[in-house]
Image: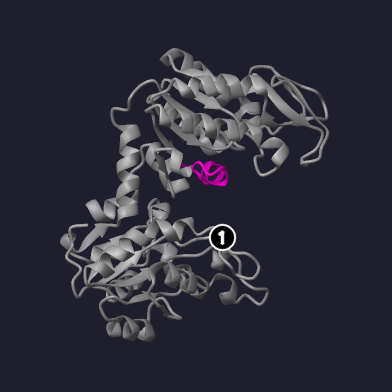
Amino acid sequence: MEINFKNKKALIRVDFNVPLDKAYNITDDTRIRMALPTIQHVLKNGGSAILMSHLGRPLKKLKEDGSLDVEKFTLRHLTGHLGELLGVAVKFCPETVGDTAQQMADALQPGEVLMLENTRFQKEEEKGDPEFSKKLAALGDVYVNDAFGTAHRAHASTTIVAQYFAPEARTFGFLMKNEVENAGKVLNNPARPFTAITGGAKVSDKILLLERFLDLVDNIIIGGGMAYTFFKAQGGKIGNSLVEDDRLELAAELLKKAEAKGVKIYLPVDSVVADKFDNNADRKVTASNAVPDGYMGLDIGEKARAEFSSVIKSSKTIIWNGPMGVFEMPNFAEGTKTIATAVAEATKAGAFSLVGGGDSVAAVNQMGLADEVSFVSTGGGAMLEMLEGKELPGIKAITG
């Protein structure tokens, strides 16, 4: 960050959309920790920090009487923990913009931190309202966007607000800069062989990504519920496995295109199947294209794990987005664990690995392997759109 923050109030967009339990305790503070270097840099260099973030979707989850559920979605829940991590008491403003916000911002001294209330309490936030953005901008001298997770949204606090700062008074935070640079490593001249691992429930969520991968990678590994749409498209029997019948033609088309482009697609040869969606269900291993009636595929089998691992370990660049099965249930987590371990081993042997997307990130964190891959992206949707080749409004707002 080239900006001189001395005596400046830095308006920083962070992504503190963290999970909370019923007592409003933070259950995973990864996103908060990732933003610390940027906030600390501002404070260390004589500036003060005014933090903006959203938390959840408060306007979509109103109380029965139609009012905002402030208690459930207030950012006040985060100030104590953030203060502990920073070693500085974090002031809290009960509004996002307005007289109180302006007064508290004006009174902020170098080295102090102010957290504004949830930006999504205001309908103007998601609309990218210019008037609201202008009021936000009036709170700070410089604007720092460190919220990669929301960079694909043209919201007021992530994109529009930047217009009210001169180009030299707006910049990326360290997290955002890292995300952009690491995405660049896989998109521009990646070392080969390049393998994309994709999983999750639906083909429809990953169509654009798969299409894009056909022009980028050498191998595509497909696991998770989405694999069964491909098996059915090839005429296989998938029992009660997850399937998108309206995407069968598309799946067949993708397989054909891959063949024409010389991209090797790997589907799991075998699956761990169960008679119901339950950790304690009756389980067996079958060929993925011959799942018995009454059973559904919930994880990849041993043969698939071995084949996928071997492809991953011989790769020089790896992107992983989406689990191989229902890894939240211990009896169906083995496939995802095996992939995570293989990615870590390939990285150790010199490959560049990027893990993106909530479930894949959760899997590497759960297994304590986050430090053993090259980069863990904090922005599922944003990273996907970047990999799909889209221009992200939050990035364009800073770079112009």
Magenta stretch secondary structure, dominant: helix
How many numbered dots are placed on residues in this image? Answer: 1
Residue 332 percent coordinates (x, y): 69, 36
Amino acid bearing label 1 = Pro
Query: For residue 42, which quarter of the picture?
Result: bottom left
**What's the residue at 55%, 64% (across, down)?**
26
Residue 202 quadrant: top right
Q: Which residues are magenta?
A: 356-369
Residue 370, image x and y in percent? 47, 43
Residue assigned mark 1: 19
Determine if the magenta segment contains residue 95: no
Q: Which picture quadrant has residue 374?
A: top left
Q: Measuring 44% from the left and 62% from the top, which residue is drawn there?
A: 126
Q: Left or right: 393 with respect to 340? A: left
**Quadrant into which the N terminus falls:** bottom left
- x%, y% of residue 53? 42, 66
Q: Nearer the viewer, residue 29 or 296?
A: 29
